[in-house]
Image (cartoon, grey):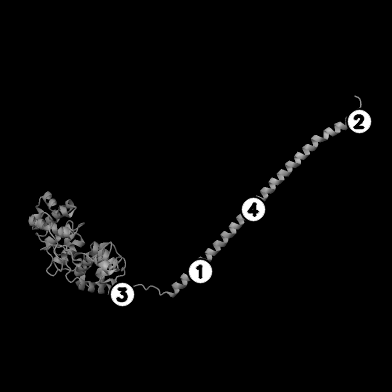
Amino acid sequence: MGEQAPGEAAKAVKSGQKPREAAVRKKSAATAATGATAAKKTAAAKKTAAAKKTVAKKATATAKKTAATAKKTAATAKKAAAKAPAAKAESRVAMVRRARRMNRELAEVYPYAHPELDFRDSFELLVATVLSAQTTDLRVNQTTPALFAAYPTPEDMAAADPERLEELIRPTGFFRAKAKSLLGLSTALRDRFDGEVPGRLEDLVTLPGVGRKTANVVLGNAYGVPGITVDTHFGRLVRRFGWTEQTDPEKVEAEIAEIFPKSEWTMLSHRVVFHGRRICHFRKPACGACPIAHDCPSYGEGETDPEKAKKLLKYEMGGQPGQRLRPPADYPGQPAPPLAGR
């Protein structure tokens, strides 16, 4: 090969430098762009971290402030509790005295308290009490005149046609089960007790459909044997009065029997039931019209405004008829109306 001319060599060198310089410039530009991007990312990361730190700092400050407030509130409550007089639990002796005082006051309000079932003898009272389950005394009183006209004695009722008996007592509800009980107890009275209603609780509770409640009603009101009748009204009121916390009827009976003398048991039952039906109602007691409100730990559960409470009163207390078609002579209210169509 021959030697290159000097001019050609210079051209070759010059033309070879341009591509290399362009590549270098391009690489530098790319490096600069990458650096700028990295710088932006770093700046954004720093900004985010700073924001998170600020949020965390604020959250910590808020938590500390909340904790301090709670601590201060607790301290204030503790201080107030320390200053306030502690609620004194009622002693057994105090409760018994209060209960007996309430009974005396109820005796003044209801001197005419009585069983609210119409009856002329022990058999009629026994039958009426059995029928009173799951219904009102008024409905029983409206039903029994026709029943006793058809079957005046245990012997008559024991021989009754079941379907006819069911039809006569249908208005009292659960008439098939009640008819079965009436036929059973009438047969037992005829066959085991010579057609007489026994005067002992041990005997009465052996009769079909007769429990302690029914037995005590018969004993207390037909035979003058003291007994506590724990029906729905009695049970809820003695708990509301704070005389017992028991819910089982037999346990309620036992605890109340320890508070009052035996001579008071029957009339106590009537007074409490009367009060429950007339003033101390289940859903909305008329607290503002209650004569024993000052001794009742449950005062305020019902209407306390006297005028509004007065409108809640029932039966003779509210100027309405009572539950008996044939009430006692000293009853101050109006007799109940007979069942329509009978």
Residue 68 picture location, percent across and down:
53, 66
Q: CA distance from mark 4 to mark 3?
A: 74 Å
Q: Secondary structure at mark 1?
A: helix
Q: Secondary structure at mark 3?
A: helix
Type of amino acid at the residue the image marks with label 3: Ala
Rendered-image quadrant of the N terminus: top right
Residue occupied by mark 3: 94
Query: Is there a contact, CB below 8 Å, between mark 4 and mark 2?
Result: no
Labelled disc at residue 205: none
Nearer to us in this view, 96 or 310: 310
Query: Is there a contact, CB below 8 Å, between mark 1 and mark 3?
Result: no
Q: Secondary structure at mark 2?
A: helix
Residue occupied by mark 4: 47
Residue occupied by mark 2: 6
Q: CA distance from mark 2 to mark 1?
A: 98 Å
Q: CA distance from mark 1 to mark 4?
A: 37 Å
Type of amino acid at the residue the image marks with label 4: Lys
Residue 51 picture location, percent across and down:
61, 55
Type of amino acid at the residue the image marks with label 2: Pro
Q: CA distance from mark 1 to mark 3?
A: 39 Å
The answer to whether one can see residue 234 in this image is: yes
Between label 2 and label 3, give the one nearer the viewer.
Answer: 2
Query: Is there a contact, CB below 8 Å, between mark 2 and mark 1?
Result: no
Residue occupied by mark 1: 72
Quadrant in which residue 291 is drawn: bottom left
Task: Answer with mark 1 or mark 4, whichever residue precedes in sequence.
Answer: 4
- The local crowd at label 3, few if under 14, some if 14 to 19, many if 20 or more residues have their Cα within 10 Å, is few
